[in-house]
Amino acid sequence: MKQARQMIRPVSDLRNNFADISRTVHETQKPVFLTKNGFGDMVVLSMEAYENMQLESEIYYKLQEAERAEENGAKRYTLAEAREKTRQAIENV
């Protein structure tokens, strides 16, 4: 599998080439890493990519919570049981 090349640019490009950086993050949905004096300083990301990253993080957190609950003996339901409980909850609204 081909690995995507990271975009690393000097922070001065944010001022001098903002439109190019904006286009890059929107088209690729990948971050652009900005350096200051040769060291990492900031990351620029499109709002859509940021929101997707936040959603993935939230899903991962919820999965970890579910795994911990299962390890601590939480009740597990079959698909049929979950559907029945959902149907009952809807009827009781």
Image (cartoon, grey):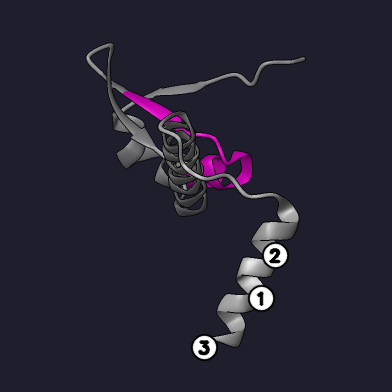
Which quadrant of the figure has residue 90? bottom right
Q: Would residue 58 appear left or right of 86 to someone viewing this image?
A: left
Which quadrant of the figure has residue 69? top left
Tag 3: Cα neighbours inside 10 Å, few (<14), some, or many (≥20)? few
- Residue at horizontal 51 percent and vertical 53 percent from the top: 48
Q: Amino acid at mark 3?
A: Val
- Mark 1 element type: helix
- Residue at horizontal 56 percent and vertical 47 percent from the top: 26
**What residue is pinned by disc 1?**
87
- Dot 3 or dot 1: first in sequence order is 1
Seen as rendered, the residue at the extreme left is 37
- Where does the magenta region start and end? 22-34
Q: Amino acid at mark 2?
A: Arg
Whether 32 is among the magenta residues is yes
**What residue is pinned by disc 3?**
93
Coordinates of residue 68 in the picture (x, y in percent): 42, 32
Label at residue 83: 2
> Does the residue at mark 1 contact the one at mark 2 (Cβ under 8 Å)?
yes
Above-or-below relation of 88 to 78: below
Tag 1: Cα neighbours inside 10 Å, few (<14), some, or many (≥20)? few
- Residue at horizontal 55 percent and vertical 40 percent from the top: 24
- Residue at horizontal 39 percent and vertical 26 percent from the top: 33
Tag 2: Cα neighbours inside 10 Å, few (<14), some, or many (≥20)? few
The Cα–Cα distance between marks 1 and 2, rounded to whole angstroms, is 6 Å
Q: Which one is nearer the viewer's eye here, 59 or 4?
A: 59
Q: Would residue 24 appear left or right of 81 to someone viewing this image?
A: left
Seen as rendered, the residue at the extreme top is 38
- Mark 2 element type: helix
- Dot 2 or dot 3: first in sequence order is 2
Q: Quadrant of the N terminus?
A: top right
Coordinates of residue 35 in the picture (x, y in percent): 30, 21
